[in-house]
Image (cartoon, rainbow, N blue to C red):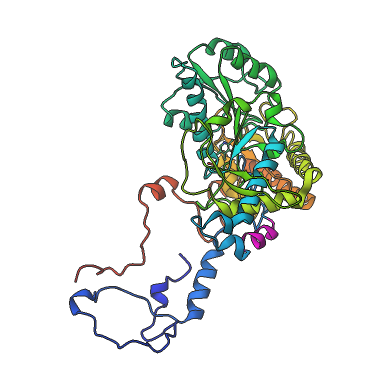
Amino acid sequence: MTEPTIYELSSPGRTGVTFPDPDVPSVKFPENLLRKDLPLPELAEVDVVRHYVNLSKYNYSVDGGFYPLGSCTMKYNPKINENTARLPGFAFTHPLQPIETVQGNLALMYTLQEWLKEITGFAALTLQPAAGAHGELTGVLIMRAYHKDRGDVKRVKMLIPDSAHGTNPASSAMSSLEVVQVPSDARGNVDLAALKAACDDTTVGLMLTNPNTLGLFDEHLEQVIKIVHDCGGLVYGDGANLNALLGVLRPGDVGIDVMHLNLHKTFSTPHGGGGPGSGPVGVTEKLADFLPGPLVGIVEESADDEPPLFGFVTPKKTIGRLKAFHGHFGMLVRAYTYIAMHGPDGLRKVAEYAVLNANYIKARLKGIYTVPFDRICMHEFVAEGQWADAPGIRALDVAKRLMDYNFHPPTNYFPLIVHEALMIEPTETENKGTLDAFTDALIKIAAEAKATPDLLHEAPHKTPFGRMDDVKAARELVLCCWLPEDYGKN
Ligand SMILES: *Cc1c(COP(=O)(O)O)cnc(C)c1O
């Protein structure tokens, strides 16, 4: 650690706060309630501010540099989203306020629901789920409820391609379903013969990530959907990769029955660091009655040009509530702003540039990095971080070395079907200069891997901390290394 801890900076008598004179008589605290061993630091405001600002500089962020973390769509978060989310009428409302006093907020949620329905081609949509995986759970519970409602209780299996995101089998298992893995074919599509063999009258449905985690659009999408429908199953679309399809393809139009979106990916609301996400779920007409409630709806039409009265409606056969109140409202304001700022043509450009940027990097790396399943990719692609003539170099070494070039590493060791995977997703918000600088760094690293492999093995060299033992860090997490040795002993 190069930064002194706040306890090392402490000096007796320094203070960062000025309390006003009390307007009540002061009393002495009972001695037995006071802890003398509590090592509270004493610092001035300037010491505290500098300490935390300096610590924050250790973090890599999307505001600080390029973040090609595959599957995560780490696009730039426009600052206007923050301005609107902070408007007092949005930021300071309480979810239990009478609905007459929050009509603007409800109008925003209603409009966002309508926009997302139009963008995806679904008949109904909930804004409740807290993130993508939570949306999956919502969707899978809806699929289960649909079959149960028809008395079709034999259906207990969820088919999941081996190119799916890991949350898909997890959501199915959490919904007490049996997960059946479907292999990919040589071009990275769902293997149709295997799908046919697996799909029967015990199948709840298929969870399809499209484009899949290889960044590839399934070339037999319509056949895949038909096979599942023909055996009575439903198709769940993992919409986390919608960034590749915005304004080009509407999943609801091609037969997908239910899908989540990640507002914190496609629609530029911030994510990472465990902060709030948002995973709205859209469904076709026949599943609309099962959505979680309440949804924002029009409860009273108005005459003339007056806005209607918005309120809450609960779908008839609802699976129930999945989230306190109405979802992460601040994320909804940000996504609304993003869509309003782009308009339909702008959203289509998002997808076009996201796909172009990924293909540009992939083309520049041709012959230098192996890309299995090499065909035109969508918004991301997966390369191998290994070479026959650089024994001992692994994807992890390439990822760590990229940090020395001041880039966030791509996702690595995922998807599992590619060995030493490096999953690169540039997003549409990067300019050609950044894409070139990143690709140049990858090309240099490929040369270093062969000429000076130890440079990679020992990377990163330029970060405040060197190579971590990830396993030890996770198993023996030390969160309070600042405590004095004798803490708690007297
Ligand atoms: C990110 C992602 C998810 C999960 O979304 P969270 O918001 O992280 O829960 C699911 N599927 C795919 C393909 C993803 O990329």
* Residue 101 spot, x, y in % from top left: 58, 59
* Residue 87 spot, x, y in % from top left: 63, 64
Image point (46%, 36%), residue name: 320
* Residue 296 spot, x, y in % from top left: 59, 44
Relative horizontal placement of residue 137, taking residue 192 as reference (left or right) = left
Query: Magenta-highlighted stretch: main secondary structure?
Result: helix
In the image, residue 177 sits, relative to residue 327, either above or below, namely: above
Residue 124, quarter of picture: top right
Quarter of the render that holds ligand 1: top right
Based on the picture, tell me whether residue 410 belongs to the magenta stretch.
no
Based on the picture, tell me whether residue 79 belongs to the magenta stretch.
yes
Image point (60%, 60%), residue name: 90
In the image, residue 456 sits, relative to residue 64, either above or below, namely: above
In the image, residue 91 sits, relative to residue 308, either above or below, namely: below
Image point (57%, 21%), residue name: 234
| Nearer the observer, 103 or 284 | 103
* Residue 91 spot, x, y in % from top left: 57, 62
Q: Can residue 302 be seen in this view?
A: yes
- The quarter of the picture where the C terminus appears is bottom left
| Nearer the observer, 253 or 402 | 253
Residue 285, quarter of picture: top right
- The quarter of the picture where the N terminus appears is bottom left
Q: Is residue 448 visible?
A: no
Image point (72%, 52%), residue name: 306
Count of numbered circles in the view: 0
Q: Outermost residue toward the right?
A: 345
Q: What stretch is highlighted in magenta?
A: 78-86
